[in-house]
Image: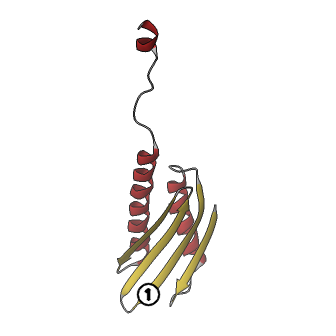
């Protein structure tokens, strides 16, 4: 997976990068078809904003979250992204059981 971390009006420190990587690794366990992710962190007065563009095979997700603390915004963003990835995985998974063919063979 290609990971790109951008900062708008904020310097992205190594601690922030490591924190984002650890949060996204947890989500990677749920989906093995991730192509790339772009995380954008921004500050506007007292509002800290974290956004992610998550590109998977067959689906692109854009999620954003704001909070007073950047780490809290990243936590909430990771939770939202995790739910969205699980929802997409559930939709793509076929829930119907395969027919055994016994009914058509007996007729």
Which image quarter: residue 48? Answer: bottom left
Residue at the right extreme of this rendering: 2
Residue located 41% across and 47% down the image: 91
> Residue shown at 38%/67% (left/top)?
76
Q: Nearer the viewer, residue 89 or 71?
A: 89
Residue 39: x and y, percent?
53, 73
In this rendering, is residue 40 above or below 100?
below
* In this picture, residue 35 sits left or right of residue 91: right
68 or 95: nearer the eye?
A: 95
Element marked by disc 1: strand
**Quarter of the image holding residue 66?**
bottom left
Display colour scheme: secondary structure
Q: Nearer the viewer, residue 10 or 81?
A: 81
> Label 1 crowding class (10 Å Cα cut-off): few <14, some 14-19, many 20+?
some
Residue pointed to by mark 1: 43
Q: Residue at x 40, y 32 (%)?
A: 96
Residue at the front extreme, as displayed? 107
Quadrant for the N terminus in the image: bottom right
- Quadrant that contains the C terminus: top left
The percent position of residue 83, horizontal first and vertical second, equals 39, 56
Instruction: Give percent across and percent down for residue 49.
Output: 41, 80
Residue 27: percent from left, percent from top: 50, 55
The image quarter in which residue 102 lies: top left
Q: In the image, is residue 46 above or below residue 87?
A: below
Q: Residue at x 46, y 48 (%)?
A: 89
């Amino acid at each position: 997976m290609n990971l790109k971390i951008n900062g708008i009006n904020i310097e992205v420190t190594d601690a922030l990068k490591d924190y984002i990587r650890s949060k996204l690794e947890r989500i990677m366990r749920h989906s093995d078809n991730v192509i790339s992710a772009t995380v954008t962190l921004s500050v506007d007065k007292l509002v800290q904003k974290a956004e992610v563009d998550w590109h998977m095979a067959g689906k692109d997700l854009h999620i954003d979250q704001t909070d007073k603390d950047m780490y809290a915004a990243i936590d909430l963003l990771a939770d939202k992204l995790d739910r969205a990835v699980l929802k997409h995985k559930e939709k793509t998974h076929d829930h119907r059981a395969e027919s055994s063919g016994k009914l058509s063979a007996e007729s």
